Every structure is written in C-alpha cells, then in structure tokens.
Amino acid sequence: MMEGTFYVVGVGPGDPQLVTLKAAAILERCNTWFVPSAFENGGSMALKIASGAVKENGKTILSHRFPMKQVHRGADVDPEVKKAWRKAAETIIEYLKKGEDVVFPTLGDPAIYSTGFYLCETLQEYGSPFRVEIVPGVSAIGASSAVAGQPLCLGDERLVVIPATFENDRIKEILELTDVVVFMKVYKVMDRLVSLLEELDLVENAVLIEKCSLEDQRVWTDIRKAQGKDIHYFSTMVVRKK
C-alpha cells in the first residue's frame, strides 16, 4: 500500500475567495482534513474558510486543539503545547500509514507564524518517512496592505514583520533600523503599542486592519481610537515611517 501525503495548505486571511486554486484542488482531493482549533470543542476559522471554498460533505474532519501559548524558538516548549503537537502528529501518522492523504488548512500563509511547520518538525522527530508538501497562501500581511491601499515596501525600503508582543526596547530598536514594520498579534498589546508609537511620533504613520477580508472588516486610520477597545485576534498593523 502506498503511504499518504501530508499537505500543509494556506487558506488565506478569511475570505474564501482568496483561497488559491492549488489549495482548493488539494482540499477537494483529500478526504481527511486535520483542522486546528484554539479551544476545546470550539470552531475552527481555518475550517470555516476551507469549507467556504470547497464543500466538506463526505470529508473526515479531525479537529484538534492547539493551545494559544507563545513559542520561543531555541527555548523549551511549554509541555501542554508540545503534547498537542505530538498528539496531532500521532493522529496524522495513523492516517498516512493507511495510505490516506491528510490536509492541514492553516490561516494565511504556512510560512508565517503557522502551526503547520511545528507539525512538520514534530513528524520529523518521529522519523516520519511520509511525503510532506507545503502550499503557500495569501498572507494576512499582504491582504492588510491591499486593504489599506499601501505598499509594504518600495525601492530600497526595508520591511520587518514582528509580533507586537515584543518588549518596547526591541520595538524601538527595530523601528530605528527599518522603514516599514508590520505588527502581528496586536490585539493583546494595543494600548501599549499606541502609546509607544505616540512617544516615537509615528502614530500618524500607522494603520490597523481588523478582520482583514471578512465581511465585518474594519480599517483604523487613527489607531488612537482603538485604545481601550476589544480588538479582534485577526488584526494587523502597518507602520510606514516615510
């Protein structure tokens, strides 16, 4: 029996119409979808996007919870997170051994802060001989730039993408060295980030895109108005110094 292939497929920032043709073809072809969820018995945004592009009728949907905890590369991984990765890898291997292809739809692009690559690394730890294919998707970064009507970088401009959860000193240092900064995960630290940008006289250079590409998408051109608000998890901020 031939062994299955594990696909990590980017399904874009939210709008099912931004799912690529290749991603849709793989989702259509694979009968087993292994979908990430942030909460026990909770919904999966990745599944919602995928099923908006390809009908899930007749598919085996395996929902798996991945704890929403920070991962610091090069440091010990939180035991709960590591356990979730291992359990996921073991389940995926079971299906691959039976010759079934498994697709893992992930938000945005798999190359950018995606659980998909952690799964690939965990499969390697198990000595997995199975074939793995990564399929890029439309990133929240690119989609946010399009919504804001601003380029990410032009000419010799330097672009940096970082989590907004970095310490203030690190953010200041990065802003000094680059021309454009894209902040991910801003929902946790919105008030602190706005205050910092005000201090650096860059608050007018920032735009916040909340729920990018979704029906209730919102663009904050004055990010000060977002202070004290319950900003959604799917939010990205672009700061252009020039």
Image (tube, grey):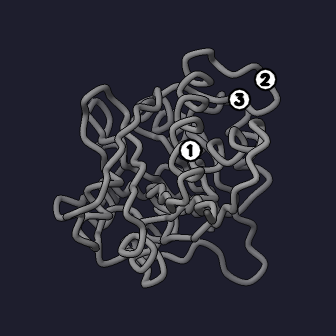
Residue occupying image coordinates x 64% and y 54%: 161
Q: Amino acid at mark 3?
A: His
Q: Position of residue 117 (x, y in %)?
A: 65, 49
Q: Is residue 11 left or right of residue 141?
A: left
User: Quadrant location of the C terminus?
Assistant: bottom right
> Mark 3: few, some, or many residues within 10 Å (few <14, many ≥20)?
few
Q: Where does residue 170 sit, x and y in percent of width and height?
A: 73, 34
Give the structural element (helix, strand or loop) at label 1: helix
Which numbered tag is attached to residue 72? Answer: 3
Q: Say what amino acid the circle numbered 2 marks.
A: Ala
Q: Quadrant of the N terminus?
A: bottom right
> Which residue corresponds to the image point at 32% horizontal and 29% vertical from the top-left?
39
Badge 1: residue crowd in 10 Å (few <14, some 14–19, many ≥20): some
Q: Nearer the viewer, residue 90 or 157?
A: 90
Verify CB contact (< 8 Å) between mark 1 and mark 2. Answer: no
Residue 153 horizontal/vertical position (percent): 65, 75
* Residue corresponding to mark 2: 75
Residue at 59% over, 38% down:
89
Q: Check disc 1 and give the amino acid type.
A: Thr
Residue at disc 2, secondary structure? loop
Residue at left offset 57%, top offset 24%: 81
Q: Position of residue 189 (x, y in %)?
A: 46, 30
Tell me the distance, in whole angstroms, between the alpha carbons under discs 1 and 2: 17 Å
Mark 3: which secondary structure?
Answer: loop
Residue on which disc 1 sits: 115
Question: Does label 1 or label 2 sit earlier along the sequence?
Answer: 2
Residue 7, disc? none
Res. 63 image quadrant? top left
How crowded is the residue under tag 2: few (<14 C-alpha within 10 Å), some, or many (20+)? few
Q: Is residue 205 visible?
A: no
CB under 8 Å between discs 2 and 3: yes
